[in-house]
Image (spheres, grey):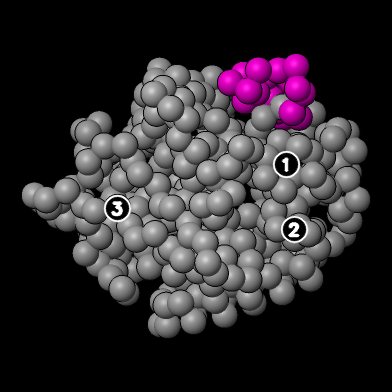
Amino acid sequence: MQITLTQPDDWHLHLRDDAMLRAVAGSTARHFSRALIMPNLVPPVVTGNDARSYRARIVKAVEEALPGSNFTPLMTLYLTESTDAGDVVQAAADGTILAVKLYPAGATTNSASGVTDIDRVMPVLEAMAQHDIVLCVHGEVTDSGVDIFDREARFIETVLEPLRRNLPELRIVLEHVTTREGASYVADSTKNLAASLTPHHLMINRNHLLAGGIRPHYYCLPIAKREEHRQALVNAATSGDPGFFLGTDSAPHTRATKESSCGCAGVFNAANTMVCLASVFEEAGALDKLEAFVSLNGPQWYGLEPNRSTMTLRKETNETPLPDVITVGDDRVIPFDPARPVYWNVVDPDFS
Ligand code: DOR
Ligand code: ZN
């Protein structure tokens, strides 16, 4: 069996910088035509100038890793309490950025410069609403009194819903949704709200992470939830609802920082996202909805044309091996293991 799709895009990607950027850039460019690049570097990508210079570093790294690929990075800014609304509006108007990212301070990797109180960034959000600039949200509260498994649902109730009531014209992506509550909140909304979904949250639940031993390479934020939530996410992804699209949240960390007494959050899935998704959609009897999820819904939300290039995936009789471990200096990055056999392969484009 073989399927051909419009070439996919990744609407949520961490590429990092320097040696890590050079090591992982090819994994995304091999399959995806465009990716929305997360700004949580150290220090973060805050201004239009930061985004322009980061973009140039990415383009160079991709050209070195995979000469001749058609990859285009789409940039975001990291929203801080001192972000200048005028700079955001200018960066969107001149095409430097496509969106702005809100990290609640302390919610995840490199989020220390994020927002402690949404009221403090209201002037920027108002300007974004006025100029139709998308806000991408890491949707978890950071209150240490709230259980880690409840942080997404609590964010929706206490931050997102009030924000949407206050500023209904602001277009928001609830990123990497991990709960039934999140999926139904987005499915039920009628306007200006969409969600990205990761391949790992479609494939693993919290038992994969915690039962029979802690598996640090499955640790990410928001954390994987119960099986019933995973099933709700698969239903959302395979529904064809244009409000749901792929954002891999591929987030490389070195093995040493993952396999540690205080391991970093992040799953590196760029290289096998597409074969994993073909498997998930086939299992759900929804291969005909895969193209909408990976290639059509995202561009439509962001007001862009779908890619003209295509991707062909083929189902093989032999199990697809896991992607190669990537070397970074004298450490490595371990790719996502989907915890079940996958039989799909990408046969085109094949830049490898
Ligand atoms: O697991 C995660 N890793 N979640 C995030 O929100 C950030 C990411 C990272 O940058 O490593
Ligand atoms: Zn992320």
> How many labels were placed on the picture?
3
Task: Kindly indicate the quadrant of the structure image that contains residue 8.
Answer: bottom left
> Secondary structure of the magenta portion, mostly?
helix
Nearer to us of marks 1 and 3 is 3
Residues at marks 3 and 2, CA–CA distance in whole angstroms: 30 Å
Q: Tell me the residue that label 2 is attached to.
A: 42
Residue 319, compared with residue 209, is above or below; it is below
User: Tag on residue 103?
Assistant: 1
Q: Are marks 3 and 2 in contact (CB under 8 Å)?
A: no
Nearer the N terminus, badge 3 or badge 2?
Answer: 2
Q: Closest to the observer: 276 or 24? A: 24
Q: Which percent across, then down, holds residue 199?
A: 41, 42
Kindly state the secondary structure of the residue where label 3 is placed: loop
The residue under the point 63% across, 71% down is: 18
Residue at 31% x, 37% y: name it: 339
Residue on which disc 3 sits: 322
- Asked whether 9 falls inside the magenta stretch, the response is no
Indicate if the residue with disc 1 has its beta carbon within 8 Å of ligand 1.
Answer: yes
Please state if 237 lies on the left or on the right of 157 as rendered.
left
Circles 1 and 3: CB atoms closer than 8 Å: no
Residue at position x 88%, y 45% from top?
81
- For the magenta stretch, what is the residue range? 142-164
Q: Amino acid at mark 2?
A: Val
150 in the magenta segment = yes
Element type where label 2 sits in the image:
loop
The circle on residue 165 is none
Q: Position of residue 181 (x, y in %)?
A: 54, 19
Q: How many residues crowd around disc 1 within 10 Å: few (fewer than 14), some, or many (20 or more)?
A: many
